[in-house]
Amino acid sequence: MSELPERCRLMMLLGALGGTTEVARLRAAGGSTCDLDDLKPAEDGRLVQMYANRLSFRHPLIGAAVVGACSERERRWAHGALAGVIDAPERRVRHLAESTVGPDEDIAGQLEATARILLRQGDAIGAIGAVAAFTRAADLSPQPADRGRRLAEAAYVGAEAGGEMVTATRLLGDAHRSGSLDTRKATSPPLSVRWPARSRPAIMGTTRRTRC
């Protein structure tokens, strides 16, 4: 991969990280940094191919190799570029989060909002995604109080949805150790993450089936 031109590697990186193979979106993400024409060395080397307005890697491991060969700075750039062209809020916020180095309340707030969207799905997959979103939002929270609240919400979602008490204990422990959790407010699940009574059995059932 190191023998490929930089612009070619960056275009391949967008395809590997993007979760999309639509060339129009990839071209938009590349902007002035790289373009589809830059993929020619990769096409000539039979690493990628474009067909029916889609980009595909000849083998899944090629995409993984591209990601591994690129620097952290290049990966952050790619995530930021993809966030600007992807419509789905969950995927967009994920890319924004990966493009950020330090605390960022704007992105943390978007991640929290995304977690609540995922919770409304009322299933185990949504709950797992919500725990991840709340946890990442806590990581990016500039204020200790917001960090503690988001860690607590992640803990309660995990415990309520699937009985993930080990994870819940760890998350609450992180909040306590950082001094950011108000224990007076941590004795019951926040209203924003309590499951409707009719939804909880379905979620628990789904979780058990997933583990089998």
Image (cartoon, rainbow, N blue to C red):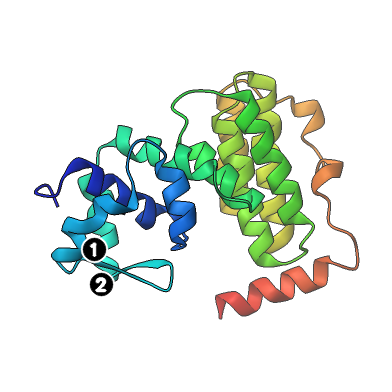
On the rendered structure, is 67 left or right of 167? left
Question: At label 1, which amino acid type do we have?
Answer: Ile
Mark 2 and mark 1 in contact? Answer it, CB < 8 Å.
yes
Circle 2 SS class:
loop
**Which of the 4 image quadrants contains residue 128?**
bottom right
Residue occupying image coordinates x 84% and y 57%: 195
**Which of the 4 image quadrants contains residue 64?**
bottom left
Q: Residues within 10 Å of mark 1 (few under 14, many from 20)?
A: some
How far across and how far down the image is residue 49, in percent?
A: 28, 69
How far across and how far down the image is residue 1, in percent?
A: 14, 52
Residue receiving disc 2: 58
How far across and how far down the image is residue 33, in percent?
A: 34, 36
Which circle marks residue 62 in the picture?
1
Residue occupying image coordinates x 25% and y 37%: 71
Nearer the observer, 42 or 109: 42
Q: Can see residue 203?
A: yes
Circle 1 SS class:
helix
On the rendered structure, is 84 left or right of 160? left
Nearer the observer, 196 or 12: 12
Question: At label 2, which amino acid type do we have?
Answer: Arg
From the image, state whether disc 2 or disc 1 is nearer to you: 2
Residue occupying image coordinates x 81% and y 30%: 185
Q: Residues within 10 Å of mark 2 (few under 14, many from 20)?
A: few
On the rendered structure, is 25 left or right of 40? right
